[in-house]
Image (cartoon, rainbow, N blue to C red):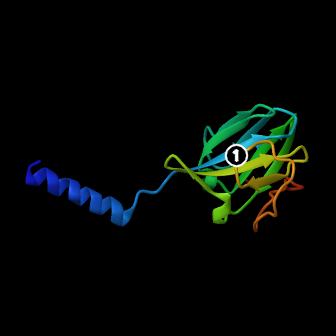
Amino acid sequence: MNRRVFLSYLLLFIFASFFGCSKPTYLILYNNTGNDIEIKFSGTANTSFKVDKNSKIKILDPSYADAFRITVNTKELYYSYKPKSPPEEFVEEVAGEKRIYCQIEPDGTIYILTTGSFPVKVFLAQPEGFPLCPSKEKTMLF
């Protein structure tokens, strides 16, 4: 290997090591409502997701939105939240990505989980900000 190629690789390694490459974060949501649902995030175009009952969806980092709506059997549930990083025990690193697992229940409550073993019957103590519960009123963002 010539010296120029070696120096290029060395600089690339130093740059990547020093500045680091951030790992993408995904939300894995399991639909345990008993109905098909649709999720719509506020302030974004074309970010509507359909999730069949008893199945899951993998969504790339939805922290850009500060509210979302879930439609369950024609009933709209509204959620407002302040994106916040959950504690380490609720974030799993797999194959170069971070995963945050959640499960939505029939009453619309969304729990954060420590693993992707779905469905969960008994929930662990929830960190600050969880579980997410739907708002009583429609949020102004929709």
Residue 40 in percent (x, y) is at 71, 42
Question: Given the current orientation, which residue lies at the most extreme left position?
Answer: 2
Is residue 84 visible from the viewing direction of this image?
no
Question: Which is more toward the observer, 98 or 47?
Answer: 98
Q: Residue at x 75, y 55 (%)?
A: 112
Residue, x 72% and y 44% (percent of image)?
Answer: 29
Whether 27 is drawn above or below 37: the answer is: below
Reading the image, the residue beneath label 1 is 116
Q: Quadrant of residue 117?
A: top right
Q: Is residue 60 above or below residue 125?
A: above
- Regarding residue 44, the answer to whether it shows in the image is yes
Q: Residue at x 80, y 42 (%)?
A: 119
What kind of residue is marked 1? Answer: Gly
| Residue situated in front as seen by the camera: 24 or 93 | 93
Q: Position of residue 77 (x, y in %)?
A: 84, 47
- Residue 109, x across and y down, in percent: 85, 52
In which image quadrant can residue 79 be found?
A: bottom right
Farthest-out residue, bottom: 128
Q: Is residue 124 rendered to the left or right of residue 14?
A: right
Q: Residues within 10 Å of mark 1 (few under 14, many from 20)?
A: some
The answer to whether 61 appears left or right of 102 in the picture is left
